[in-house]
Amino acid sequence: MKTADFDFDLPPDRIAEHPAKPRDAARLLDVAERLHDRTVRDLPALLEPGDLMVVNDTRVIPARLDGRRGEVRVEITLHKREGEREWATFARPGKRLKPGDVIAIADDLNAEVVAKDGMEVRLRFSKGGPALMEALHRHGRMPLPPYIRREADEQDVADYQTVFAAREGAVAAPTAGLHFTPELLAALDARGIRRVPVTLHVGAGTFLPVKVDDIAEHRMHSEWGEISAETAEAINATRAAGGRIVSVGTTALRILETAGLDDRSIRAFSGDTDIFITPGYRFKIVDLLVTNFHLPRSTLFMLVCAFAGMDRMKAAYAHAIGQNYRFFSYGDASLLRRV
């Protein structure tokens, strides 16, 4: 298939700069045989007792850093942890950076360029482990997506974090989870919708454009994830009892499908995944998906087309644009059913 097959026109004013207040007041497009305009607060009534909701418990770190290489200002966005002191990053400007260069970030923090691979710059920081994380919290900024045309502010420290956030390591939020509030979780509990966590530390590579014409040639970014034995057991038990698996977001879906087996059971998992889901993929685990509206020509729009059907998703997105739904990380949500 061609990347152009997943293109659509999106007016710039549909891109949300701030989230809905309160979070669960966001709109929800229910994509079934017909399209229904709802709100996120309607979600409990759209699910059934015995369904199992899977959420991503990753926590976004302040992954954007400002530094200097000599007199040149350098902006660093952490991408993927590669060790106690090393991270794969994106740097601007990055073309002139070379191994051995040192980027000064603060009096107590610098980073040495150890390798380059295309757009990616691997850095070794002067601190590691908890000390590095403490330094990131002192000197870093919340890494808002590139399509939000403003600087992160103090409100984003809370807004760009889900109610499920527990394990630090993401450099982008699992945005479907941003719609959930304690009140919505209580309503789901009352409906008999159980909930289990997985972890996928979302990397900045999620925003990289697909630059090839043939999607089979696209190189998918790698991210670290984990599914505990307890979560795997709950998923398998739900499936055996006839319940449905509801993924909150494409990040949870990607790690679930990475660990899924051909008999539609799942195993515990810990490690990297670069799974790239496109139309024709046979889903093993997920039955329903709560997800935001994604970029044209993106791997995530390809994923939702694979999950719910290309024609159906193109019609849903045309409806969302026509009805002034808000797109991307701080935008509205959709509920999709596997075809």
Image (cartoon, rainbow, N blue to C red):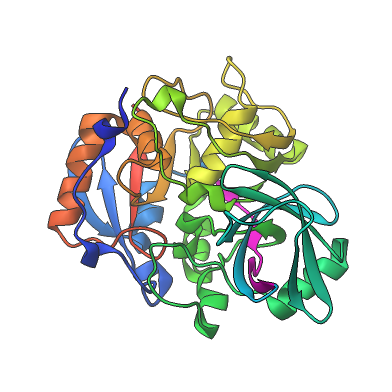
Residue numbers of the magenta segment: 54-69
| Residue 62 sits inside the magenta stretch | yes
Check the picture and name the quadrant holding the N terminus. top left
Residue at the far bottom in the pictured view: 154
The residue at the point 40 percent across, 49 percent down is 291
- Looking at the magenta stretch, what is its main secondary structure? strand
Q: Decide if residue 31 is on the left or right side of residue 92.
A: left
- Image coordinates of residue 256 in percent, x first then y, are 59, 35
Q: Is residue 104 placed above or below 187 in the rendered structure?
A: below
Q: Residue at x 87, y 69 (%)?
A: 131
Q: Residue at x 25, y 58 (%)?
A: 38
Front one among 90 and 96: 96
Asked whether the viewer can see residue 123, the reply is yes
The answer to which of 137 and 262 lies nearer the viewer is 137
Residue 194 in view here: no
13 within the magenta span: no
